[in-house]
Each structure stands twice: as C-alpha cells, then as structure tokens.
Image (spheres, rainbow, N blue to C red):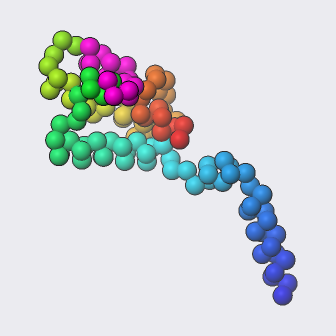
Amino acid sequence: MNDQPLRDDTFFAEIAIPDDAREAQYRAPSRLKARIYSRLVKRQLVSGPLLSLTRTKQSGRSLCVFENLVQTLPVGEKAKTFNCCSVCHARVLGEQLEHAPIFWGNCPYVGFRRS
C-alpha cells in the first residue's frame, strides 16, 4: 500500500513534463535520420530514375545549392535525375556527426538536425 503514493508521484511528474521536452526525449539522432534517408534514396533509384530537378522545382519543392547548380546546367533532363546527395560532403558529415557543420538552406541533412 505504501507503493501507491510513489506511483502517483511518478505519474504526475511524467505528465508535468512539457510536450516538446517529452518529444525531444524520444527524438531519433540526426545521424540515424541521415543514414535512413540516404538508404531510402538509394533504394528508390533501384526502381527507376528519380524525378528530374527541373520537375522537382516546378512542383514547388526547394532545391539545395548544388541541386540548383545542376538544375541550371544546359544538359538534358535525364542528366538532371542525378542524385546530388550521393556525392555531397553534407551527406557524409550528416551521417557521421550529430551536429554536422552544414549551413546552407534546403539541404535535407540540415533539416534532420531540426526535426
């Protein structure tokens, strides 16, 4: 019977934690997110080419600095289905470091640090 007040205290202590702090407690490390993302993109390439960067931009998605560069090159659309992340140093940093020093906008590996 002495255990009951202790359990109640623990319960109330748990529900007193703000939602954002509770979510942070269960948040996956950004390195893990980066590795999963890289593997998913590789797996997607097996089934066929990725959407071209031109069509990706037209659909309203933002491109990173390097994708913007490739998208503006005077090459065919097939060449613009290239996965820039596969050769980008941001991918390597994102997969290896928890707080990778990547600072340009629209890079998915930067986004993993925030979510």
Q: The N terminus lies in which quarter of the figure?
A: bottom right
**Viewer-side residue, 16 vs 96:** 16
Q: Residue at x 53, y 41 (%)?
A: 115
Instruction: Indicate yes or no whether the magenta region holds residue 59.
Output: yes
Instruction: Indicate yes or no whether the magenta region holds residue 14.
Output: no
Left or right of 108 in this view: 41:
left
Q: Main secondary structure of the magenta part?
A: helix
| Residue 35 can be seen, yes or no | yes
Q: Residue at x 46, y 22 (%)?
A: 104
Question: Which residue appears farthest toward the front when viewing the image?
Answer: 59
* Residue 111 drawn at (x, y percent): 48, 34
**Viewer-side residue, 67 vs 34:** 67
Left or right of 65 in this view: 16:
right
Position above or below: 75 against 78: above
Write down the region rendered in magenta: 58-72
| Residue 82 can be seen, yes or no | no
Q: Residue at x 36, y 35 (%)?
A: 92
Q: Residue at x 81, y 82 (%)?
A: 3
Left or right of 13 in this view: 20:
left
Position above or below: 77 against 26: above
* Residue 74 drawn at (x, y percent): 18, 12
**Viewer-side residue, 53 vs 64:** 53
